[in-house]
Image (spheres, rainbow, N blue to C red):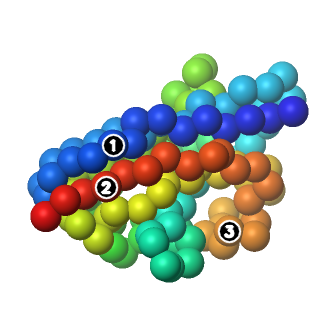
Amino acid sequence: QVQLVESGGGLVQTGDSLRLSCAASGRSFSTSFMAWFRQAPGKEREFVSLIAWRNDNTYYADSVQGRFTISRDNAKNTVYLQMDSLKPEDTAVYYCAARRAFVSSRQMKDYETWGQGTQDTVSS
């Protein structure tokens, strides 16, 4: 059974940086895309960024473009989200997710495996 475990969340101030990690485990782990989503209090979960597992294709939500960077380490089955210039509106629980299909998607429903989430809080 494949599991995704996020880490790296915390409490920071406006303008600070955080780096999230998502490690995949399980002998049957195979994916085409890894993505980060987030859910702020009282809001729906939203797409943040995704990365293809076998090439350099990346995509970002407009709200984080230029501030967040997604990357991966295939040897470690790990995806990262470097978050710079953080704003209070970035406060949310961040989830990583994996998608096996060969077409990218920004829709939650298209991801089969999810992590438990990690809380990021940005104070003003």
- On the question of residue 13 being in view, the answer is yes
- On the question of residue 34 being in view, the answer is no
Q: Residues within 10 Å of mark 1 (few under 14, many from 20)?
A: some
Q: Residue 116 location, x and y as percent?
A: 63, 46
Q: Quadrant of residue 62?
A: bottom left
Give the residue pinned by disc 2.
Answer: 121
Callout 3 secondary element: helix
Q: Residue 9 location, x and y as percent?
A: 39, 42
- Name the outermost residue toward the bottom: 43
**Label 2 vs 3, first from the N-terminus:** 3
Q: Residues within 10 Å of mark 3 (few under 14, many from 20)?
A: some
Q: Are marks 1 and 2 in contact (CB under 8 Å)?
A: yes
Give the residue pinned by disc 1.
Answer: 10
- Residue found at x 59% / y 31%: 23
- Residue found at x 43% / y 50%: 119
Q: Which quadrant is home to the C terminus? A: bottom left
Residue type, numbered disc 3: Met
**Label 1 vs 2, first from the N-terminus:** 1
- Residue found at x 56% / y 71%: 45
Q: Quadrant of residue 25?
A: top right
